[in-house]
Image: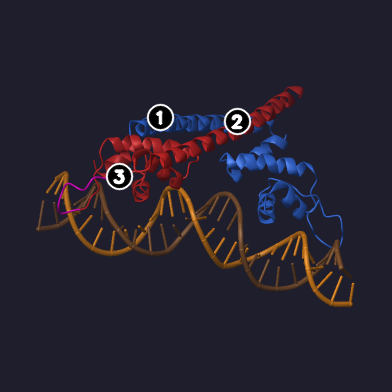
Chain colours: A red, B blue, C brown, D orange
Amino acid sequence: MKIGELSEKSGLSRDTIRLYEKNGLITSTASQSETNNYREYGDDVLLQLQFVTGARSAGISIADLRELMNAFFDSCDPSQAENVLVAKIDELKERTLQIENVITFLDAALERVRKGMNET
Amino acid sequence: MKIGELSEKSGLSRDTIRLYEKNGLITSTASQSETNNYREYGDDVLLQLQFVTGARSAGISIADLRELMNAFFDSCDPSQAENVLVAKIDELKERTLQIENVITFLDAALERVRKGMNET
DNA sequence: AAAAACAATAGACCACGGTCCACGGTTTTG
DNA sequence: CAAAACCGTGGACCGTGGTCTATTGTTTTT
């Protein structure tokens, strides 16, 4: 499919898709026609974009994502890949801890607010 | 304490502390002396900064944090505060889901990489 | 063929979060 | 007192992630 359709299906703007591709998060196959240089995407790219979108909204940077992609697809140095993966997993677990910390705090605040409302 | 000491204890730069204060995440009491306008911070600010730092590293924006602070301290409209809190909590839970999603994916990738290494 | 819709590229632009710098004032130290 | 260390302010600056625009080229539609 071409970028417009992918944009439609993924919910991302064409610009964002091109940005992701430029940063190596997705790949377009060589264009079909000889007369244009339109990007052509396979269906798998849609799944990849869904993953990327989730990861981005989880706060993972594009650079990190690219590194992860490389670790995932690139078998040239498996022990290196393993290191990257382990490091990122740890980082993400740490992040969830922080978030849960904040949630706990907010829950307490919520409790407090609700009590205050009843007092009135 | 003055900003230098707070910077020392919090591990944040003076600039960052001023930025946070400008954005309403912390508050300094009026300066002691009449001749200067140095900021003066209470011990509680250190705790607040720790919270802010955790929240920031969890990917919560300064603007959101300010909103949360307002919801927390400001009792002028409790039901409004409650709404904000509930919304943010939901948002954070959603975020943890996304992160766990990514972790699962990375765990699978890790597994795969390790298998590949044994094959050799 | 002509118009409309789509695509590529480059570059400007934006918000965010944070750092750095230059300047001038204040306090502390020796 | 003099120098060093500290503080405040304003503005420039930077990287990140994304959007918008202008220009040009291609495909599709009528």
Residue range (magenta): A28-36
Q: Nearer the viewer, residue D5 or A25?
A: D5
- Magenta stretch containing residue A69, yes or no? no
Q: Residues within 10 Å of mark 2 (few under 14, many from 20)?
A: some
The amino acid on which the numbered mark 2 sits, given as a three-letter code, is Glu
Q: Position of residue B14 (x, y in %)?
A: 70, 55
Q: Position of residue A45 (x, y in %)?
A: 30, 38
The amino acid on which the numbered mark 3 sits, given as a three-letter code, is Thr
Q: Is residue D29 above or below residue B14?
A: above
Question: Residue pushed farthest front?
Answer: B120
Q: Residues within 10 Å of mark 1 (few under 14, many from 20)?
A: few
Q: Nearer the viewer, residue A8 or A89?
A: A89
The mark found on residue B111 in the picture is: 1
Q: Is residue B100 above or below residue A38?
A: above
Q: Is residue B81 visible?
A: yes
Closer to the eye: label 1 or 3: 1
Q: Residue A78, located in which quarter of the rendered image?
A: top left
Please report, as a chain letter, where disc 3 is located.
A
The answer to which of marks 3 and 2 sits earlier in the sequence is 3
Q: Which residue is mark 3?
A: A27
Q: Residue B113, located in which quarter of the rendered image?
A: top left
Q: Which residue is mark 2?
A: A100
